[in-house]
Amino acid sequence: MTTDPVPEFGPEFSTHLRLIEMARELPPVANKGDHSRLSDVASTLLEAFVRHAEDERFLVLRLPPFTARLVENGQQRVVDRLVSLVLEADLAEQPCRCSELAEEIASLIEMQIVSEEWDQFGG
């Protein structure tokens, strides 16, 4: 008897879950006001998300052109907002928009991952 909890899902599923977990870590870190830690956490997420987008590019390119553009645009929006958060945290100016950006990114990544799974794996 095997104890594999989700045998029907591939490695993309665990990567998606990890990205969502990482994104959910952003708001609590941002709310603490530790800009250095926030910059590190956001930078790590940015690297992981870019790697994810590169790894799944072949899947995106197999989608219908309009759907592929939507996925790519969503991925670019996540990257842009993460870059903004890293820069905002690095500058540590007052007032800081870090908490709002962190909340937005957590929502964007979750929506992006759900959309990718729906588009690529048929829901």
Image (cartoon, helix red, strand yellow):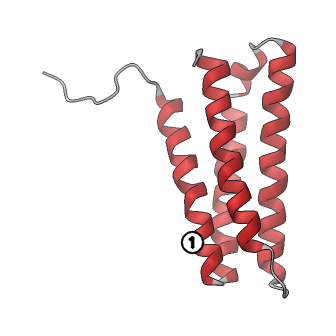
Outermost residue, left side? 1
Residue 111 at x, y = what percent? 67, 40
Outermost residue, bottom side? 94
Residue 97 at x, y = what percent? 80, 74
Displayed quadrant of residue 60: top right
Question: Measuring 77% from the left and 58% from the top, which residue is drawn there?
Answer: 82
Instruction: Give the camera-side residue of 87 and 122.
Output: 122
Instruction: Give the camera-side residue of 33 and 4.
Output: 33
- Residue 117 in view of the camera: yes
Residue 53 at x, y = what percent? 71, 37
Q: Is residue 118 left or right of residue 89?
A: left
Displayed quadrant of residue 83: bottom right
What SS does tag 1 mark?
helix
Q: Is residue 91 above or below residue 76?
A: below
Q: Which residue is mark 1?
A: 28
Residue 90 at x, y = what percent? 79, 78
Q: Is residue 18 left or right of residue 74?
A: left
Question: Measuring 64% from the left and 19% from the top, which residue is drawn there?
Answer: 120
Q: Is residue 49 above or below residue 84?
A: above
Query: Residue flagged by tag 1: what amino acid is it?
Result: Pro
Circle 1 Cα neighbour tier, 10 Å, few/some/many (<14 / 14–19 / ≥20): few
Quadrant where the image shows the C terminus = top right
Q: Is residue 27 left or right of residue 10?
A: right
Q: Is residue 37 above or below residue 122?
A: below
Q: Is residue 57 above or below residue 39?
A: above
- Residue 52 in view of the camera: no
Quadrant where the image shows the N terminus = top left
Displayed quadrant of residue 2: top left
Instruction: Give the camera-side residue of 47 and 22.
Output: 22
